[in-house]
Image (cartoon, grey):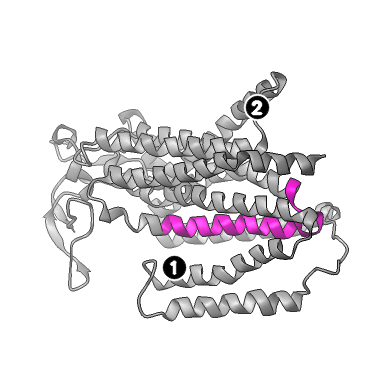
């Protein structure tokens, strides 16, 4: 909850710093915040260090030198290879390098299953499945920082109500767009900057925001339009987390009393299915925008974030819970790292998916692709549900 309260608030600081001082100040603020967090952690670590329970070394454990030799060094080598291969496989040198570097680490986690004893094999296998499913979830969920931000910027009516335009401007929490012609960057119908010789083309006209705004909404008197900063939409998801967490918890308590509460693996499967439904909200948004010809209400985005937040609350805490419950005790921390590795790979694949945004003239197809990915993951989860439930019950007894 603390993480999401911070995520809810931080975007207002970012918008203020960007509007008042510029992008450099906004990034500096983020760095200062992280540095302060490190200082606070250093001050309180003595109060929590007792929770660091180190398991005794066992015969099958790998030494740190062996981990460096068999995992870290191959990952670095593979990353370098991915960077320098002549033709990009996934769109950029950095993406190829990242995915290549992950391969030795993935092989290492698979080897944990191969080398595990009979008692540990099944729970490790179940966790590897959870990691794979999590990759699919995060690949779609993290569109909030890419494709959904583009939708907010170019296809959402972000004009602030008149009553709060003044206070928002005073607090540097609004973007003021002039409605008189000026030399501005030229954009095509998909809001790609038109370039010549690698440089954006300038032309006399209105800001790109007006390209698909209903003509009656363009001020006739030349007055500026006050818009919500796009970064503030990044607060919607954590805001939903804060609001919906008590509701979801209460729902599970109610189901438990009725002896109908789904198992932890089942919650993950349902979370994937609910997340798939969130992409259909965006398919509706594209239809409402007439294929992007008109801006639509921000409630489409807010609704999308609301639905996928429910899916996140079903899946993300449950994934962490499964790691702690299913992992063999001596490698719990390692398997937790595997869960976050899956998050990292999902984040990168989210960027790969988002890079295809302009390949879809009909943006509904982009969201349909995301929907299919989540439906495939949900289908796999439901197919394997009985097997995962059996392993979960075995570990709980």
Q: Residue at x 85, y 69 (%)?
A: 59
Q: Which residue, given by chain and number where applicable, does mark 1 sit on?
A: 95
Residue at image point 80% right, 68% down: 61
| Residue 357: % across, % down | 31, 53
Residue 52, by quadrant, is bottom right
- On the image, which quarter does residue 253 sit in? top right
Residue 239 seen in the current view: no
Quarter residue 40 falls in: bottom right
**Figure quadrant of the N terminus:** top right
Q: Which residue is mark 2?
A: 252
Classify residue 319 as left or right of residue 391. left
Mark 1 nearby-residue class (10 Å; few <14, some 14–19, many ≥20): many
Q: Is residue 329 magenta?
A: yes
Task: Please report whichever mark, 2 or 1, sits nearer to the chain's N-terminal start.
Answer: 1
Magenta includes 312? no
Q: How many marks?
A: 2
Q: What range of the chain is rendered magenta?
A: 325-351
């Amino acid at each position: 909850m603390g993480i999401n309260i911070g995520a809810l608030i931080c975007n207002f600081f970012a918008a203020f710093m960007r509007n008042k001082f510029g992008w450099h100040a906004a990034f500096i603020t983020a760095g200062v915040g992280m540095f302060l967090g490190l200082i606070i952690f250093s001050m309180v670590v003595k109060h929590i260090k007792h929770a660091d329970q180190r398991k005794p070394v066992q015969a099958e454990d790998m030494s740190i030198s062996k981990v460096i030799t068999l995992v870290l060094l191959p990952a670095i080598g593979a990353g370098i290879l991915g960077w320098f291969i002549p033709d990009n496989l996934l769109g950029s040198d950095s993406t190829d390098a990242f995915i290549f570097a992950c391969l030795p680490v993935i092989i290492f986690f698979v080897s944990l299953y191969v080398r595990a004893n009979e008692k540990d094999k099944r729970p490790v296998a179940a966790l590897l499945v959870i990691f794979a499913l999590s990759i699919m979830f995060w690949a779609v969920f993290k569109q909030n920082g890419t494709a959904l931000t583009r939708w907010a910027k170019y296809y959402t009516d972000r004009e602030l109500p008149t009553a709060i335009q003044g206070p928002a401007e005073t607090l540097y929490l609004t973007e003021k767009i002039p409605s008189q012609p000026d030399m501005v960057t030229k954009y095509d119908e998909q809001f790609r900057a038109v370039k010549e010789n690698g440089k954006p083309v300038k032309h006399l006209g209105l800001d790109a925001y007006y390209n698909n705004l209903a003509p009656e909404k363009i001020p006739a008197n030349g007055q500026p339009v006050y818009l919500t900063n796009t970064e503030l939409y990044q607060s919607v998801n954590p805001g939903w987390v804060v609001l919906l967490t008590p509701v979801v918890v209460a729902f599970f308590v109610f189901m438990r009393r009725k002896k109908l509460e789904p198992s932890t693996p089942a919650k993950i499967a349902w979370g994937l299915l609910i997340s798939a439904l969130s992409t259909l909200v965006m398919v509706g948004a594209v239809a409402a925008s007439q294929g992007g010809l008109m801006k639509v209400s921000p409630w489409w985005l807010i609704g999308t974030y609301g639905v996928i937040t429910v899916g996140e609350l079903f899946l993300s805490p449950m994934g962490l819970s499964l790691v702690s419950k299913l992992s063999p005790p001596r490698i719990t921390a390692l398997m937790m790292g595997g869960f976050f590795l899956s998050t990292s790979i999902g984040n990168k694949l989210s960027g790969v998916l988002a890079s295809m945004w302009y390949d879809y003239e009909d943006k509904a197809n982009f969201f349909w692709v995301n929907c299919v990915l989540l439906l495939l993951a949900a289908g796999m989860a439901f197919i394997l549900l009985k097997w995962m439930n059996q392993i979960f019950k075995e570990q709980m007894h």
